[in-house]
Amino acid sequence: MDTAGVSVSVAGNFDKGDGSMTESGSLDAAGQAGTARYDVLVVGAGIVGLGVAYAAHRRGLRVLVCERASEVVGASVRNFGHLCFTPQSGRAYEFAQRSRELWRELAREADFWLQETGTWVVARTDEEFAVLREFARVRGPREVHTHTVASIESKVPVAEAVGGVLLPLDCQVNPREAASAVRAYLQRCGVEFRFRTAVGAVASGVAHTSRGDIRADQIVLATNHDIDLLMPDLAQQHGVLRCGLDMMRVTMGLRAPLTAPLLTGWSLLRYSGFADMAATVDLRARLHSEFPELAQLDLNEMYTQLPDGSVIVGDTHYRGESVASFQREIAFDSLLSLARERFDVTDVRVLERWQGMYASAANEFLQDIRPDTGIHVAVVTTGIGMSCGLGFAEHTVARIFADSTWAGASPVLREAAAVTTSRHPDHELTGSVQ
Ligand SMILES: Cc1cc2nc3c(=O)[nH]c(=O)nc-3n(C[C@H](O)[C@H](O)[C@H](O)COP(=O)(O)OP(=O)(O)OC[C@H]3O[C@@H](n4cnc5c(N)ncnc54)[C@H](O)[C@@H]3O)c2cc1C
């Protein structure tokens, strides 16, 4: 808080301690957002912004997070809650491994539901199983456990599997509560938040917001796809598009609970760790020629079960400078018919449908560090921000403060990342300073 006795702006929504929000606080005499100066201003209260705030707070810095919505509402609550640490490669793998430590630490400190039950990946054909076996050979038994068809059938409520793997180090959170729990925890730690406060423009040392100017030495833009509004030239330079996704939450009569997130053959084409395998080339050709309509939807058939028993079902992808406001029923029909087949059920009831959105580009991360202006950008430019975002955010803060060491860059991790990077030298960061 301001030490000069000036009324400091605390406009925004505040946690009353029981998780509910109330709007309170005061504007300064000019009705502006306040005269306080922060060490770090974070724009965006999604998981990346929260990760930046957490890392900066742990350095003893004075941190303010500015969010235009009244709560955490973006991609960080609209996802599967799948912390998919294992099938990443290169930098994403390093960020994912560090994120794993940070998620576990935050779940303990902030007291939210995090399951360490891994990820099931089931193969329905020999081609799919070939990719998984190759992946198991490359990664070894610490990261991948191979299961026979009998074992899969006894542990996962799917039909028609030929085998599969468990990725035991992966985790799951409830996306409806995890980021909000982190936000509430950071607030208790002294990180300040201003909700319903949109940043319209930034200049060195100042953000111009819908509630007046906010001053900060370092400003980090963690706005996800909206980086194309705040920094249109940078977004264009890095080919950032918007990616829309169709999602659903359903109930269905599974023969047993889905104890961990479930990935399928379609997922093997998507996550860079799987996509790097030689056997994936054949699988891609086969899935695309056999199911052209599903390939057209750019589908990733996957499922996570929430603690209340309902199942998140998704997803499809469509990209552009803007994405269609209207979701096509054919996407939902396809996802539902795949779910019926996958679990051999008929009674699928849709509880909710929604559209998610994230930034999409050829590289997986846009990290732009500008020591000259103090304005920095941290955006995950593909759909792995829950898995990698916390580590990426911490790495961003380390670079802003010119740390030569970053907690995630242990020699063991570097070695593992080097193995996973061998076929994917281009899975790198983009941005001004490497
Ligand atoms: C449907 C879907 C499923 C996904 N599933 C998974 C998954 O299972 N596992 C996984 O690892 N990843 C998943 N992802 C990706 C992951 O959710 C995202 O990468 C991650 O949440 C991005 O976090 P973020 O903080 O960058 O963005 P967001 O959570 O979108 O937060 C950005 C925030 O910035 C705010 N903001 C923007 N502009 C301004 C402004 N000018 N002023 C103030 N505030 C502003 C927005 O209101 C928003 O709250 C999924 C994404 C989607 C959409």
Image: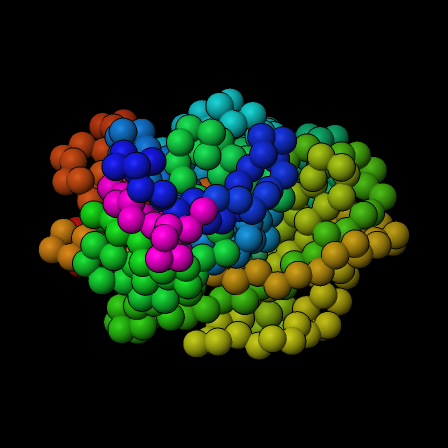
Does 432 sit above or below residue 312?
A: below
Say which of 398 and 58 sits in front.
58
Q: Residue at x 77, y 38 (%)?
A: 309
Visible residue check, residue 345: yes
Residue 314 lies left or right of residue 61; in this view the side is right
Residue 405 lies left or right of residue 337; in this view the side is left
Does 290 sit above or below residue 381?
A: below
Does 308 sit above or below residue 215?
A: above
Visible residue check, residue 366: no
Question: Percent from the top left, x then y, of residue 346?
Answer: 87, 54
Residue 388 lies left or right of residue 201; in this view the side is right
Question: Percent from the top left, x then y, of residue 239?
Answer: 32, 71
Name the quadrant of the N terminus.
top left
Question: Percent from the top left, x then y, of residue 395?
Answer: 27, 40
Q: Quadrant of residue 398?
A: top left
Q: Which residues are magenta?
A: 26-45
Q: Main secondary structure of the magenta part?
A: loop
Q: Is residue 40 magenta?
A: yes
